[in-house]
Image (cartoon, grey):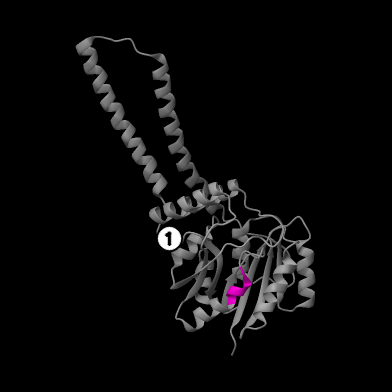
């Protein structure tokens, strides 16, 4: 009996590249000894992405699509795809051709014949990426691996092949604030990493600005580490100690030398600095409380507006 592989493809305003992705992927999977299904997830696109999905579904029975009622984000799109996939193996890949379909045979061979549970991909280089963005990306991966229990490889992509047991484990983690790279590392399983050269988009423009990536990195740190809370606590303790030492020092100096003239500017700067540290620590606490607040609401990860088959 042949295995069934589900290709989960999150899409947001990908009308230009989606037909290219489909044609190139078909060329690869038609040569593989497995059955396939496409799970296209339209993340509230504002262009004609959904129209292209309808056309593909009309001519290929292997194509299934789900269209969100609005933009819920890539994390929600990937989760929806995993929840509705029916394959023995699931592959998450982007439609912009930066996840080469040509790697699918190698990934499938690794899980079937090399003893690996899952296969993930990572970029060998960041060629074509702005230097400042590459710098912060590398620092983020070093930081998240030091302060969390997740094993996230530098340059890791969401492009990976997972067995049904791993997919079920990920779905069971139904948290509202998701950081999939951290979840993939947290659930474990024996993983083979396939490095490849960075590939430019086949068409269209990236949807990930520096600010969006920055917010996404904060989600990863807050979701998978309590280190910021510990750091803010230690900052508070250090400043308490400094204030006690300072009080003793100025008291002794006054007894020994009298009351010297003090500078209002330095005093104001000190008060402002300490106030800033306090606000920073409160802000860190607020980040965790905000995520707890969203989790307790128990809102759905996504809302399906349209699909060519019933949601699981």
Please state the horizontal and vertical placement of residue 305, each as a whole percent of the image. 73, 62
Query: In the image, is residue 103 part of the stretch drawn in magenta?
Result: yes
Which residue is pictured at 54% across the width and 76% down the height?
A: 107
Which residue is pictured at 79% across the width and 77% down the height?
A: 59
On the image, which quarter does residue 103 sit in?
bottom right
Which residue is pictured at 61% across the width and 74% down the height?
A: 102
Magenta stretch, main secondary structure, is helix
Work out whether residue 85 can be spotted: no
Query: In the image, is residue 123 part of the stretch drawn in magenta?
Result: no
Tell me the quarter of the image containing the N terminus: bottom right
Secondary structure beneath label 1: loop
Highlighted magenta segment, given as a residue range: 100-104
Q: Residue furthest left?
A: 256
Residue behind mark 1? 150
Please state the horizontal and vertical placement of residue 194, each as a whole percent of the image. 50, 70
Residue 121 horizontal side relative to residue 149, left or right: right
Q: For this rendering, which residue is in front, 111 or 197?
A: 197
Q: Residue furthest front?
A: 127
Label tally: 1
Please state the horizontal and vertical placement of residue 276, each as a whole percent of the image. 45, 31
In this view, 242 is above or below 98: above
**What is the crowding at mark 1: few (fewer than 14 residues within 10 Å), some, or many (at least 20)?**
some
In this view, 29 is above or below 173: below
């Amino acid at each position: 009996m042949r295995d069934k592989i589900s290709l989960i493809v999150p899409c947001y305003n990908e009308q230009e590249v989606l037909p290219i992705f489909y044609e190139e992927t078909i060329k690869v999977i038609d040569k593989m000894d497995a059955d396939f299904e496409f799970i296209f997830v339209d993340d509230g696109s504002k262009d004609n992405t959904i129209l292209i999905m309808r056309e593909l579904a009309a001519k290929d029975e292997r194509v299934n699509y789900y269209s969100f009622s609005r933009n819920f984000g890539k994390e929600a799109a990937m989760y929806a795809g995993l929840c509705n996939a029916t394959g023995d193996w699931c592959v998450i890949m982007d439609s912009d051709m930066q996840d080469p379909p040509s790697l699918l045979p190698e990934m499938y061979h690794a899980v079937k014949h090399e003893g690996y549970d899952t296969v993930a991909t990572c970029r060998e280089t960041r060629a074509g990426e702005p230097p400042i963005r590459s710098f912060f990306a590398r620092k983020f991966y070093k930081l998240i691996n030091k302060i969390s229990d997740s094993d996230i490889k530098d340059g890791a992509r969401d492009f990976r092949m997972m067995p049904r047991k791993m997919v079920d484990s990920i779905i069971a983690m139904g948290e509202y604030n998701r950081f999939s790279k951290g979840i993939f590392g947290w659930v474990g399983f024996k993983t083979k990493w396939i490095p490849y050269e960075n590939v430019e988009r086949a068409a269209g423009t990236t949807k990930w600005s520096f600010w969006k990536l920055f917010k996404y990195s904060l989600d990863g740190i807050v979701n998978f580490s309590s280190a910021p809370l510990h750091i803010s606590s230690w900052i508070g303790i250090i400043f308490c100690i400094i204030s006690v030492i300072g009080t003793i020092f100025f008291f002794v100096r006054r007894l020994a030398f009298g009351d010297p003239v003090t500078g209002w500017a330095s005093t104001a700067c000190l008060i402002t600095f300490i106030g800033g540290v306090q606000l920073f620590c409160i802000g860190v606490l607020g980040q965790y409380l905000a995520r707890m607040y969203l989790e307790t609401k128990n809102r759905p990860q996504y809302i399906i507006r349209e699909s060519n088959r019933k949601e699981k």
